[in-house]
Amino acid sequence: MASDVIRALDANAGDLLSYLERRNGLDDAPDLLTETMAVAWRRAKDLPDTSEEARMWLFGIAKGVLANAVRGRVRRQKLADRLCTISGAASATAPAAEYGGSHRARCHSASTGRVG
């Protein structure tokens, strides 16, 4: 059973990585592939018998991993927006220099993941 999962992952890892890169970008794709492999390993008993079905099964797992990543990104974005709203109300009367620049610039960089 374990060798079957390894064989299926070896045969499809490159295509899975390409799929994840197209859907989520080059930076996060290797981590998503690792998560896909971990899920496949945990669910090894569910591995279909034929190589074609195993491939579809692996891509189904990758799709679920992608969905989880998107949900996590949305949750983090909403939290960042909420924190910026809260901190904006709290710092509206405070001097900008005390906080290292404008509140708007800090919240923009926090919510987009970019500085400046």
Image (tube, grey):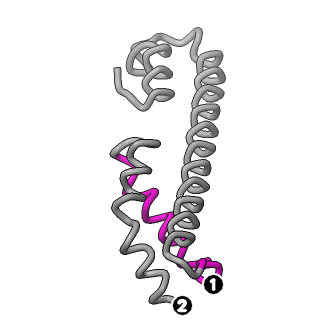
Which residue has dot 1 on it? 45
Q: Which amino acid does label 2 sit on?
A: Met
**For mark 2, does the 10 Å Cα neighbourhood hold few (<14), some (14 to 19), or many (20 or more) residues?**
few
In the figure, 96 relative to 7: above or below?
A: above
Most common SS among magenta residues? helix
Question: Residue 106, image x and y in percent?
Answer: 45, 21
Quadrant occupied by the C terminus: top left
> 102 or 107, which lies in front?
107
* Residue 90 quadrant: top right
Which residue is at a point 43% across and 50% down the rendered structure image?
20
> 28 or 13, which lies in front?
13
Number of numbered callouts drawn: 2
Which residue is at a point 53% across and 58% down the rendered structure image?
62
> 66 or 15, which lies in front?
15
**For mark 1, does the 10 Å Cα neighbourhood hold few (<14), some (14 to 19), or many (20 or more) residues?**
few
Q: Is residue 40 left or right of residue 82?
A: left
Question: Residue 17, image x and y in percent?
Answer: 38, 56
In the figure, 25 relative to 56: above or below?
A: above
- Mark 1 or mark 2: whose residue is earlier in sequence: 2
**Span colored in magenta:** 27-48
Question: Residue 21, image x and y in percent?
Answer: 38, 47
Disc 1 and disc 2 in contact, CB within 8 angstroms: yes
Q: What residue type is labelled 1?
A: Lys
Q: Is residue 37 left or right of residue 114?
A: right
Which residue is at a point 63% across and 84% down the rendered structure image?
45
Alpha carbon separation for disc pair 1 and 2: 7 Å
Secondary structure category for the residue under label 1: helix
Q: Does residue 22 show up magenta in the picture?
A: no
Which residue has dot 2 on it? 1
Quadrant occupied by the N terminus: bottom right
Which residue is at a point 53% across and 60% down the rendered structure image?
59
